[in-house]
Image (cartoon, rainbow, N blue to C red):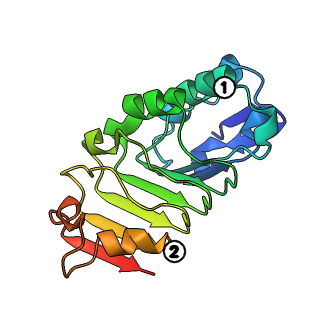
Amino acid sequence: MRVVIELGSWRIYMNDLCKLGINCLENVKNAKEACSAKLCAKRRITDLTLCWSNTDARNIDLDENVLDNLQPPEHLIISWNNELISFSNEEEQWFLKVGSFLSELDFSFLTPLRSLLSSLESFSSLQKLNIEDVLMLRESPNLPPSLRSLYIQGCHPELFERYREDGGSDRHKIAHIPSVLIHA
């Protein structure tokens, strides 16, 4: 049996998916529509990418309700937003709710982002963190003790200085991570 979910004008064949990207989240009408996707019940989905294409049309209250009802799988990718400078309090609160379920988290192609989630250290199941092409990122918060792999590429040169093996000022923040790969 093939399950078809309609989210707005999209038809999603959920039984076959293990990776899902949802773009134009600003077009989701309400939390009920987001909840109807029942993503948290789709056990085969391991990678979920959520994107807003038109940040001018964003409604923070609606965004929070949409996020609350689009519960992520174990791997979440946050990418391709050229207006995100920092995470709002509402977004931080959402991540506090779901952070303990994430095993892998990617921040990529977020050119203006200046800071990661302040709650990142509390993501107790996070094992892999990828940060790629976050050009304005100069430092990171403390990272969770569960982290096994850290990959950083294309960030601000100051971040590389802080994590230098030969005495970077924040090297202690990543000393517990078995696999660290940092590229300029």
Amino acid type shown at disc 1: Ile
The answer to whether residue 35 of the structure is visible from this angle is: no
Coordinates of residue 60 in the picture (x, y in percent): 66, 25
Farthest residue to the right: give it.
9
Front one among 17 and 113: 113
User: Which residue does the image show at 54% across and 44% down from the upper left?
Assistant: 86
Indicate which disc residue 60 carries. 1
The first of marks 2 and 1 along the sequence is: 1
Hey, what amino acid is under mark 2? Gly
What residue is drawn where x is 56% and y is 67%? 135
Out of 57 and 71, give the one closest to the viewer. Answer: 57
Residue 148, image x, y percentages: 23, 62
Q: Residue at x 59, y 48 (%)?
A: 85
Task: Return the x and y of residue 16 as percentages of the image width and height.
Answer: 60, 51
Q: Is residue 44 above or below residue 163?
A: above
Pointer 2 residue: 154
**Numbered disc 1: secondary structure:** helix
